[in-house]
């Protein structure tokens, strides 16, 4: 084979005859080697069958990216103390309890002393024969605050409510039903006694500002007397008994009075949300209670199991983490996050091994539940803090912008190289096929192949042959 033939073949292979010197398709058409090259593993570019290395690397990076995403999702629900183990509050007094309220600030323990529970006002009428028609007219009801020291009633912002009592509603039961239908903030009921009945009226809201008075416009024209007509249900606390104050007060409207670690607090409700940081107090009676915090041990154990499962899932899915510098960096970052994590100080310092989270010889993680439970019982807050810290740091590795950007660029580069002339495998495949075509001319082609230097050789030989 002379230089002219060699140049001709190279020129055809590199598209010189079609003025497209880098077009790979010409190589397959000129040599007829496309079919012969199609049996190997890898992808095809311009009729050349490329080695499988590019596809393998793309697959490895794809698994790694997916593993990082799954790990981020799994540990994302464990990166705060309350997500690792919820907090409950305990009281040593059943009359005084507390519920966690995350909107009320950080939780803390406290001593609570209640001297007075909040109450709603309650009134009761004189005894009536059950068949008696009490009277007709209108009940005018005001809510506000009664000051016994000055014997004054100050109406609040709520407008006066009116309940009309007609003939059909003039019995005790009828009056009770009319009040309840009106929805004025008072609950009415008839209390049966031996041979008589009484009307009982209770405010629906507690607190000093929820006192109420009832002034009557009686159809008999006397709205204050206690001997006849609807005025027998009048109650104005500033009036004289039997002359406008005709109901008996069984219970006064009042605020809850309490102390939290010695700090005095008043509340119109028995659900006190501003007394104890991170909690709402529930008052059912008076007394003293010690409110303490307690982390959920079962939830903490489940969280530790989730963390171990997430780590094992990542390492199983990610594959070989020692394949190149990028994968080794991710592995090193994770090892650092897990190995350096600790909480507390001095005798209360904890690491994952002390929690029963250890790595086996096969590289998998395992949880010693008995060891974990002992550690949690001894230091619940420390264990909870360590688990959330580990989850947070592992999540940080998955979100490391430098690593994720490099992984993305490497993946995009491999994809691009797999479909363009910049792939070094393309030039190498050209060299192999041309050697086969030209009788394995090692003296001409045994040098580092690239697309452009093979093209240059073709140009040189084309000129030299003439």
Image (cartoon, rainbow, N blue to C red):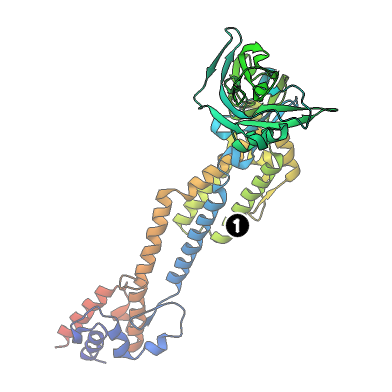
Using a 10 Å C-alpha cutoff, classify the residue at mark 1 as few (fewer than 14 neighbours), some (14 to 19) or many (20 or more).
Answer: some
- Residue 86 in view: yes
Q: Position of residue 406 (x, y in %)?
A: 39, 55
Left or right, 19 with reference to 241: left
Left or right, 428 with reference to 294: left
Closer to the camera in the image, 244 or 374: 244
Q: Position of residue 367 (x, y in %)?
A: 69, 47
Compared to 49, does 270 lie above or below?
A: above
Compared to 20, does 397 lie above or below?
A: above
The residue identified by callout 1 is 313
Residue drawn at (56%, 30%), measured in percent from left and top? Answer: 162
Left or right, 117 with reference to 333: right
Which residue of the protein is positioned furthest toward the front in this rendering?
A: 220
Compared to 227, does 90 lie above or below?
A: below
- Residue 105 in view: no
Closer to the camera in the image, 185 or 368: 185
Residue drawn at (52%, 20%), measured in percent from left and top? Answer: 155
Q: Position of residue 463 (x, y in %)?
A: 15, 83
Q: Quadrant of residue 165?
A: top right
Q: Quadrant of residue 370?
A: top right
User: What is the quadrant of the N terminus in the image?
Assistant: bottom left
Count of labels in the image: 1
Which residue of the protein is positioned furthest toward the right in this rendering?
A: 194
Residue drawn at (37%, 73%), measured in percent from left and top? Answer: 425
User: What is the quadrant of the C terminus in the image?
Assistant: bottom left
Mark 1: secondary structure: helix
Closer to the camera in the image, 68 or 276: 276
Q: Position of residue 240 (x, y in %)?
A: 64, 10
């Amino acid at each position: 084979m002379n230089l002219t033939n060699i140049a001709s073949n190279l020129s055809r292979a590199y598209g010189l005859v079609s003025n497209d010197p880098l077009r790979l398709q010409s190589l397959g058409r000129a040599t007829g080697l496309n079919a012969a090259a199609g049996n190997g593993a890898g992808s095809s570019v311009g009729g050349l069958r490329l080695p499988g290395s590019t596809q393998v690397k793309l697959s490895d990076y794809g698994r790694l990216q997916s593993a990082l995403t799954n790990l981020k999702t799994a540990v994302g629900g464990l990166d705060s103390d309350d997500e690792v183990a919820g907090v409950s509050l305990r009281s040593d007094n059943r009359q005084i309890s507390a519920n966690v309220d995350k909107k009320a600030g950080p939780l803390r323990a406290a001593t609570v002393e209640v001297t007075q529970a909040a109450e709603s006002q309650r009134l009761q009428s004189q005894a009536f024969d059950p068949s008696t028609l009490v009277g007709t007219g209108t009940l005018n009801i005001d809510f506000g605050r009664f000051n016994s020291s000055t014997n004054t009633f100050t109406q609040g912002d709520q407008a006066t409510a009116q309940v009309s009592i007609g003939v059909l509603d003039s019995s005790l039961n009828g009056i009770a039903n009319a009040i309840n239908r009106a929805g004025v903030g008072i609950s009415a009921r008839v209390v049966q006694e031996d041979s008589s009945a009484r009307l009982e009226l209770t405010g629906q809201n507690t607190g000093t500002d929820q006192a109420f008075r009832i002034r009557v416009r009686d159809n008999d024209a006397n709205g204050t007397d206690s001997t006849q007509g609807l005025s027998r249900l009048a109650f104005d606390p500033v009036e004289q008994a039997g002359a406008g104050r005709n109901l008996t007060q069984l219970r006064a409207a009042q605020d809850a009075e309490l102390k939290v670690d010695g700090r005095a607090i008043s509340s119109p409700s028995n659900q006190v949300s501003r007394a104890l940081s991170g909690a709402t107090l529930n008052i059912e009676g008076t007394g003293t209670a010690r409110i303490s915090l307690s982390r959920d041990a079962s939830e903490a154990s489940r969280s530790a199991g989730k963390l171990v499962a997430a780590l094992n899932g990542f390492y199983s899915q990610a594959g070989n983490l020692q394949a190149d510098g990028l994968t080794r960096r991710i592995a090193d970052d994770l090892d650092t996050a897990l190995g350096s994590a600790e909480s507390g100080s001095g005798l209360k310092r904890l690491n994952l091994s002390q929690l029963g989270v250890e790595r086996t010889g096969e590289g998998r993680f395992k949880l010693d539940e008995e060891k974990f439970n002992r550690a949690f019982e001894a230091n619940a807050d420390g264990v909870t803090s360590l688990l959330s810290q580990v989850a947070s740091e592992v999540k940080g590795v998955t979100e490391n912008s430098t690593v994720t950007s490099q992984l993305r660029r490497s993946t995009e580069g491999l994809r691009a190289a797999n479909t363009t002339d910049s792939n070094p495998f393309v030039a190498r495949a050209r060299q192999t096929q041309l050697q086969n075509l030209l009788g394995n001319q090692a003296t001409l082609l045994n040098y580092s192949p690239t697309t452009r230097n093979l093209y240059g050789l073709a140009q040189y030989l084309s000129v030299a042959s003439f």
